[in-house]
Amino acid sequence: MRIAIFSDSYRPEINGVVTSVDTVCDELREQGHEVYIFAPRYFGRRDDNPWHVRFPSIPFPFPQMKERRVSLPWGGALRKFGKLEIDVIHSQVPGTNGIYALIASWLWRVPHVHTYHTHYMEYTHYMPFALNFSKRAVIWIARHFCGRCQHVISPSHGMREAILEHGVDAPVSVVPTGIDMRTDQESQALSDLLTRYDLGDPARVSGKRLLVSVGRLGREKNICYLIRALAIIKERHDFHFLMIGNGPDRSEIEELIDRLGLGDRVTLVGYVGHEDIFAFIQQCDLFVFASVTETQGLVLLESMSVGTPVVAIEGIGVSDLLEHNTGGLATRSSMVDFTNAVDRMLSDDELLHRKGVEALERAHEWSVENQVAKIIRIYRDSIDDFRRHGLPRFRRRQRY
């Protein structure tokens, strides 16, 4: 098949959507499919990859999401699309490139599949509007955008329920992104990683329990909760915490670290190369995660793929991944429950080892090969549905 991926987020941006796009595209190409990516151009950077089509773009208008881009209308991209004889469109974000995916689907009569990656209701605090208006807008966009797609993919069962509650009138299937099990990944010494990224003297972490987390330093990722939890855990364990990622709340988080006296126990790593994320995690004892906005917890799956167990707060995506506490411990959002779970893991080497073994087994179940096979079936079903019924007609439901 010839597949066109439309995404409002792509490299050099670093986030879960970009990781998902690359993971799925690589596997699709491995299986012999042609995949073209339609994405924003960042800062005027040239992209000579023949499989990439870049739209001119400007920064997102909300200051706390300035790394995101708004793609500008450009006929050249759509003309390129028209020459490719695409079999199916797969959009990733219902933003400007998502709109262009809808337009291309309508103009060239191509079936359109959409993956609803993000629980946008948890991001309405970034919108400069009244909260009630922002939430109604999220529901309206989800219902009208997804209702014009042949099929919608949800990364978790909890997210599927949220999509249906928005009134989406389209088939919705649960397909997590999956994970490349990285059998060729070479282990790297933590001291080498710390030196490469200029993160201070490696000796300060020697002999300590190592905790790690990955995520955008934004309110929706609940990083301040993690830092407060560490202030409690420091009374029980000698540890060092590595926080990988960056974002608008970094200065607030730095102030909280200083106020709680955690300066010698926490390193804000910032952005690192994707391969090095796995290397950092592999050298740590435990992955800790407090976000409740994840639709599938892809970073948890990445941790499990290198045998590092997880403690995370139950949420839409986390509950699927850590079902029956396989590969780690899922806790309620109570600070007592969360810190006790971390304490339990760090105090019991046998439990830590067993959960690490479970993590690897769980990651194999969620391999990208298995998940992409499901996506391909959805593509084929959407193509067959389109041949029988044409583009979907949106049926209005009750007003929200």
Image (cartoon, rainbow, N blue to C red):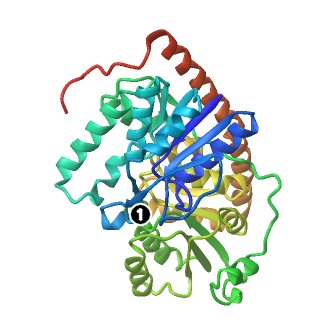
Direction from residue 193 to residue 240 in the image, left or right: left
Q: Is residue 129 shown to the viewer in this render?
A: yes
Residues 253 and 10: in front is: 10
Q: Residue shown at 31%/32% (left/top)?
A: 143
Residues 184 and 282: in front is: 184
Residue 238 in the image, given as x and y percentages of width and height: 62, 80
Name the residue that disc number 1 marks.
Answer: 222
Residue 26 in the image, given as x and y percentages of width and height: 69, 44
Direction from residue 162 to residue 76 in the image, left or right: right
- Name above or below for residue 354 compared with residue 97: below
- Name above or below for residue 88 compared with residue 302: above
Q: Residue shown at 58%/75% (left/top)?
A: 241
Residue 255 falls in image quadrant: bottom left
Direction from residue 207 to residue 342 in the image, left or right: left
- Name above or below for residue 82 compared with residue 263: above
- Crowdedness of circle 1 by 10 Å Cα count: few (<14), some, many (20+)? some
Q: Residue shown at 68%/90% (left/top)?
A: 201
Residue 221 in the image, given as x and y percentages of width and height: 43, 61
Q: Is residue 155 shown to the viewer in this render?
A: no
- Quadrant occupied by the C terminus: top left
Residue 59 in the image, given as x and y percentages of width and height: 38, 63
Q: Residue shown at 64%/46% (left/top)?
A: 51
Residues 33 and 210: in front is: 33
Residue 68 falls in image quadrant: bottom left
Q: Which amino acid does label 1 sit on?
A: Asn
Number of numbered discs present? 1
- Quadrant occupied by the N terminus: top right
- Asked which secondary structure carries label 1, the reply is loop
